[in-house]
Image (cartoon, rainbow, N blue to C red):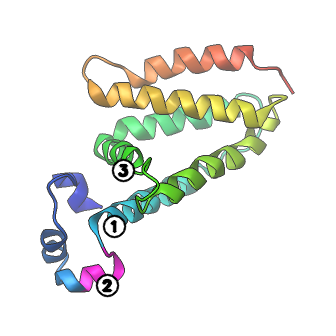
Amino acid sequence: MAIIDAEGHQSLTMRALARACGMTAPGLMHYFPDMATLVVAVVDHRDTRDRAGLATFAPGPGATRRVLGEIVDNIVARPQAAELFAIVEAQAIDSRHPGHEYFRARAERLVDEFSPLMAAEFAHPHELAMQLFGVMDGLQLNWLRDRAAFSLRERWDAVADAIVAAAEPA
């Protein structure tokens, strides 16, 4: 993760990455047969780590906005990770990509994981979670295109506040 954060992943090769990790390319390829599989594993590892940090939120008034705000703050704090995620997710739209099923299942898992938190506040938590994560993904892409001119947190707060205000209470 540190190597990809420092150098990006676009021009990184399996050979260079293996060398930087003190391995041979065949040794690295024993675990990851290609770069696409490796970057999906990096995204998954980061996602698991970041989700663990959010597990402390308890359902209750305002919990939905607080936890989703933390996610947005995490994205802003780690732009290289956000860029990697967005690029790999876009590549994984192709059903032949090794991350295709991972990203499909991830989207469903996020909604399923956050619905119980949202259920304490809102009548239709599953639908609300899908809406909020969809908006978050779109805003993140706009922010990645021009971080200097686009405040992800400000835009997120405005849109999320409007969606939450329109949601039917529990």
Residues under labels 2 and 1: Cα distance?
11 Å
Q: Quadrant of residue 133?
A: top right
> Can you say whether 158 is above or below 60 in the image?
above
Give the class, few, some or many, for how many residues have Cα within 10 Å of label 3's Cα (few <14, many ≥20).
many
Name the side, left or right, on which 116 lies relative to 38: right
Q: Is 28 part of what is drawn in magenta?
A: yes
Give the class, few, some or many, for how many residues have Cα within 10 Å of label 1's Cα (few <14, many ≥20).
some
Q: Position of residue 69 (x, y in %)?
A: 54, 32
The earlier-in-sequence mark between 3 and 2 is 2
Residues under labels 3 and 2: Cα distance?
21 Å
> Can you say whether 26 is above or below 58 in the image?
below
Q: Quadrant of residue 27?
A: bottom left
Magenta stretch: give its range: 27-33
Q: Residue at x 77, y 34 (%)?
A: 125
Residue 2: give its label.
none
Q: Which residue is mark 3?
A: 88
The earlier-in-sequence mark between 2 and 1 is 2
